[in-house]
């Protein structure tokens, strides 16, 4: 006759089954000992016996002062390293994105290996070679110069051959069904331009980055808003720069639009960094913001409130995006999802860089 299970074995099997059926996430917290005791109508001593077994056999882990958390013995994941390859690391919105990724990876028992392409295609290729030749389970990547690159087919093929999962942030990879997490940049361009139109502006200049998809999509939103208002397109007041000539281009662009007889009353800027450069260039010409020209931008970075002109801008989720990217890549590695695609809605943050016409 088969022996009936002890009470602590019943508890153990219950939580093991939850893990095996992927009904819980790695790193998700178990109920408290009191809650478990109440659920199974047993003593806390019995609960501790069960939890100690689960810890010993690797199904859960404990953190002092915090409680018990699910592990995932079901998944035979031996590689616990996730590479993060971004265009930049140490400035602008990137520290917060990387901080969010690192915090979530560490909480879930993964290690972060950080790479920086400096938004250069050749540097990115070298980084890919380094990543592919290491013990990597997954990759979170922001593609360099994404309108002219969109990740190298050869590099993507190598990732897939080595069964390395990957997800893009702030852009998408080359295939239509790739995994990605982005902000709706076209919607952002539309919202910023529409906001200026509602303030009475009709002669609205814009400056975008031409060698990444964010710039391309923000430009589309800007054009869509103008079209809806029945305004004709004036290419003389639309500027496009690339990574290599940003510094020089912005000042030249500002001088150009100021030289036009019917000069613009507002400028939509690619991001907060560009917006501050535009403002500095305007100041050199004794043009005041927002009294003479209104300015809007993207990303709601720390720069947006760093000067006396507080920028109206589109919010970038930064740390939240980093956490979500980490969760998605772990779920991909551990087999719970295939190719997640997530788009953050563009949120307009209104400050004092615009005036009504």
Image (cartoon, rainbow, N blue to C red):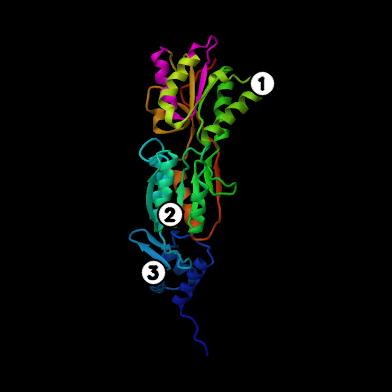
Along the polypeptide, which appears first: circle 1 or circle 3?
3
Q: Residue furthest bottom?
A: 1
Residue drawn at x 56%, y 49% as measured from the top left: 178
In the image, is residue 99 above or below residue 301?
below
Q: Choose between 130 and 77: the one closer to the eye.
A: 130
Q: Is residue 190 visible?
A: no
**Helix, strand or loop for disc 1:** loop
Measured from the top left, where is residue 93 in percent x and y?
41, 37
**Helix, strand or loop for disc 3:** helix
Which residue range is magenta in the image? 258-286
Distance CA(mark 3)–CA(mark 2): 33 Å
Measured from the top left, where is residue 182 in percent x and y?
52, 42
The residue under label 1 is 230
Q: Residue furthest left?
A: 64
Q: Left or right? Give the position of 191 relative to 60.
A: right
Does the segment drawn in magenta span residue 200?
A: no
Along the polypeptide, which appears first: circle 3 or circle 2?
3
Q: Choose between 331 and 179: the one closer to the eye.
A: 179
Residue drawn at x 51%, y 68% as measured from the top left: 20
Measured from the top left, where is residue 111 in percent x and y?
37, 55
Residue 99's label in the rendered image is none
> Closer to the camera: disc 2 or disc 1?
2
Residue drawn at x 45%, y 15% as measured from the top left: 255
Distance CA(mark 1)–CA(mark 3): 66 Å
Among the 4 quarters of the image, the one containing residue 278: top left
- The count of marks equals 3
* Marks 1,3: beta carbons within 8 A: no
The residue under label 3 is 55
> Closer to the camera: disc 3 or disc 2?
2
Q: Choose between 74 and 62: the one closer to the eye.
A: 74
The residue under label 2 is 132
């Amino acid at each position: 006759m088969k022996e009936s299970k002890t009470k602590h074995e019943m508890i153990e099997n219950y939580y093991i089954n939850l893990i095996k059926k992927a009904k819980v996430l790695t790193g998700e917290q178990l109920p408290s000992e009191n809650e478990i005791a109440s659920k199974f109508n047993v003593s806390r001593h019995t609960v501790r016996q069960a939890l100690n077994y689960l810890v010993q056999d690797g199904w859960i882990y404990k953190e002092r002062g915090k409680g018990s958390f699910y592990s995932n013995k079901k998944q035979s994941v031996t590689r616990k390293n996730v590479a993060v390859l971004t265009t930049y690391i140490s400035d602008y919105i990137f520290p917060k994105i990387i901080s969010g990724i690192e915090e979530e990876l560490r909480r879930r028992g993964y290690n972060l290996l950080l790479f920086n392409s400096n938004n250069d295609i050749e540097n990115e290729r070298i980084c890919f070679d380094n990543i592919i030749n290491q013990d990597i389970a997954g990759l979170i990547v922001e593609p360099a110069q994404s309108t002219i690159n969109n990740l190298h087919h050869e590099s993507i093929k190598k990732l897939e051959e080595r069964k390395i999962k990957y997800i893009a942030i702030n852009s998408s990879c080359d295939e239509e069904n790739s995994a990605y997490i982005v902000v709706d940049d076209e919607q952002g361009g539309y919202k910023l331009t529409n906001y200026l139109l509602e303030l009475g502006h009709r002669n609205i200049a814009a400056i975008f980055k031409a060698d990444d998809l964010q710039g391309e999509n923000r430009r589309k939103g800007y054009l869509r808003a103008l079209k809806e208002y029945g305004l004709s397109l004036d290419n003389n007041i639309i500027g496009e720069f690339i990574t290599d000539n940003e510094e020089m281009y912005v000042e030249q662009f500002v001088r150009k639009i100021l030289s036009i007889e019917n000069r613009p009353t507002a400028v939509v800027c690619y991001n907060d960094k560009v917006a501050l450069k535009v403002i500095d260039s305007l100041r050199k010409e004794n043009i005041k913001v927002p009294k003479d020209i209104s300015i809007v931008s993207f990303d709601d970075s720390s720069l947006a409130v760093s000067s006396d002109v507080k920028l109206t801008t589109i919010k970038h989720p930064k740390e939240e995006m980093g956490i979500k990217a980490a969760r998605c890549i772990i779920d991909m590695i551990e087999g719970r999802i295939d190719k997640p695609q997530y788009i953050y809605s563009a949120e307009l943050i209104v400050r004092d860089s615009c005036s009504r016409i």
